[in-house]
């Protein structure tokens, strides 16, 4: 069975509350994948929901001048040296 990506239509400025017949949970405002069955086809026909494309998060580039954005790990020896330098400065 195929799926449909559906989101509730806006009615009077607010998203419609359309419940899943199995879980009774309201359809998420951002949309959800639902089974392509008679129930959801009726909701489409009645204008309660609309087919949509899933929104995928796109990675944002790292604004730092070094780029990348990976965390650097300090070795235990490096950490000890850093603490010693900090103590000697105080």
Image (cartoon, rainbow, N blue to C red):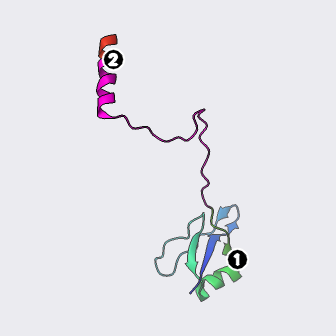
Q: Would you call the spot at circle 2 few (<14 residues within 10 Å), some (14-19), or many (20 or more)?
A: few
50 lies above or below 75: below
- Please tell me whether mark 2 or mark 1 is closer to you in this view: 2
Residue at image mark 2: 85
- Asked if one can make out residue 49 in the rendered structure from this viewpoint, the answer is yes
**Is residue 68 within the magenta segment?**
yes
Q: Say which element carries label 2.
A: helix
The residues colored magenta run 56-85
The residue nearer to you, when weighing 54 against 11, is 54
Q: Is residue 90 visible?
A: no
Residue placed at 32% from the left, 29% from the top? 79
Asked which secondary structure carries label 1, the reply is loop
SS majority, magenta: loop
- State which tag comes first along the sequence, 2 or 1: 1
Identify the image quadrant of residue 4. bottom right
Give coordinates of residue 67: x percent, y percent: 58, 38
Q: Residue at x 69, y 67 (%)?
A: 11
Residue wearing tag 1: 47
- Quarter that holds the N terminus: bottom right
* Residue nearest the viewer, comparing 74 with 35: 74
- Which class describes the residues within 10 Å of circle 1: few (<14), some (14-19), or many (20+)? some
């Amino acid at each position: 069975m195929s799926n449909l990506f559906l989101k509730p239509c806006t009615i009077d400025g607010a998203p419609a509350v359309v419940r899943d017949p199995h879980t009774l949970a309201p359809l998420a405002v951002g949309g959800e994948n639902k089974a392509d069955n008679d129930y959801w086809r009726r909701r489409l026909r009645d204008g309660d929901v609309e087919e949509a494309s899933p929104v995928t998060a796109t990675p944002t580039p790292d604004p730092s001048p070094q780029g990348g954005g990976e965390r650097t790990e300090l070795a235990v020896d490096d950490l000890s040296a850093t603490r010693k330098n900090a103590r000697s400065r105080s």
